[in-house]
Amino acid sequence: MPSRRWKCDRSLPVCHKCLSSGSECLGYGKLFVWNQGVASRGKMMGKTYEETNKSKKRIVSVKHPIGPETNNPRFSLESQRHEDLPVNVEVEEVPRQEPEVTVHTTLVDPLYQDLNPNSRYYLYHFVTQICMDMVIYDGGPGHNPFRDLVPATIAYPTLLHIILAGSAQHVFNISQDPITPSTYQPDKRPCLVLYYQSVSRFGGPMKTSYADALLAKQQALSLMAKSVASLTPANADVILATILMFINYDLIESGRDKWRIHVEGARKIIERLDTPPYLQQPMSKLRLAVLSDFLVFFVIGSTFTFSTARLLIPETIDLGPILQYAETNNYLSMPGPLLRIMAESFKLEDTRKHTSDDIALPVQDQLGMLLKAALDFDPAVSTVIH
């Protein structure tokens, strides 16, 4: 039975009717875009595209012919060329235009050209969208520690694969939304619009994003054991960042409690950070970003699930800089005083033998002090201070 034919709506970068119906769009080939640049050959070599559009004008003064006794071939040729023109006529010379076709490459760095087109786009998607969502304010190069991790993917394949996995899963999630507005969603999501605007340069929408995510995650898991076994003071922060990317992948994929496994794995590395040679004074921006995200995920996740696990970060590590960084940079923007109160609650000892037993009086006093501190917190005053 022949497939149903759709009337193309000529939308760019993809036909909305074909995309919404799941059909393969056969109406578009490669889209070539005229671009501004410098001519590489021809008479206009070395000049800009704008210069080729500017007409050159020259004044031709035609004098009275001297007569047949003139034997100058050049003069004869010029006379024949302009013999029908009046005196002082502006002759417009339009140079031959040789437009250039710009081929958009996915990544300029040749170190990434060995990746397939899908992987190159997922890395681009991580840089342009996911990194922005992982912080409160994205200040550009040098101000987002997660974007600054991209050059490290060359030396750390585990980090590369888990970044690709998270990006592919994010692409799969946002591509499930309808491309056309509906009653329940009158406006298109900005991340979806940006996705369709940028993916056309990489060959069109990613139809295998979910399979790509699972494959990249499996490759990252297979390499993770080797990475942890080769832990050194030089790569400790990068390995912690890799584990953090596993947590972000689980949150993007389902949001369930699978992230706990990765937190417990990171605990053994974090416990080394307060002793030489792993100790940093002061902490690097990458370590602050990683530890603050770990702390926020652990405290909030354990609080809402009534977990009694011990605090993730050892008491010998100063929580002040970590809490301040978490408040001003973590995308959850948990106020530092409240986050500290929640973190202090993990130090309370559970002396009960059964859940029906009463809490010991010293523990009740400590718990009352924490609750009073939480009630005394004034968001307005905290906002003015920061």
Image (cartoon, grey):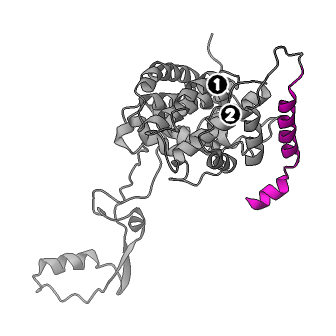
Seen in the picture, residue 322 relative to 347 is either above or below; the reply is: below
Task: State the image coordinates of residue 102 (x, y, percent, origin top left).
Answer: 41, 48
Q: Main secondary structure of the magenta part?
A: helix
> Disc 2 designates what residue?
297
Quarter of the image where the C terminus is located: bottom right
Is 364 covered by the magenta stretch? yes
Task: State whether residue 204 appears in this view.
Answer: no
Seen in the picture, residue 13 relative to 168 is either above or below; the reply is: below
Q: Is residue 300 left or right of residue 96?
A: right
Task: State whether residue 99 appears in this view.
Answer: yes
Mark 1 or mark 2, earlier in chain: 1
- State the image quarter where residue 312 is shown: top right
Identity, as a three-letter code, of the amino acid under mark 1:
Trp
The one nearer the camera, 50 or 63, is 50
Q: Rounded to the nearest whole Å, what is the CA distance between mark 1 and mark 2?
A: 9 Å
Magenta span? 358-386
Seen in the picture, residue 58 relative to 165 is either above or below; the reply is: below
Classed neighbour count for the residue bearing mark 2: other residues with Cα under 10 Å, few (<14), some (14–19), many (≥20):
some
> Disc 1 designates what residue?
259
The residue located at (63%, 45%) in the rendering is 322
The reply to whether discs 1 and 2 touch (Cβ–Cβ < 8 Å) is: yes
Say which mark, if any, is on residue 220. Answer: none
**Outermost residue toward the top in this view:** 1
Task: State the image coordinates of residue 382 (x, y, percent, origin top left).
Answer: 79, 55
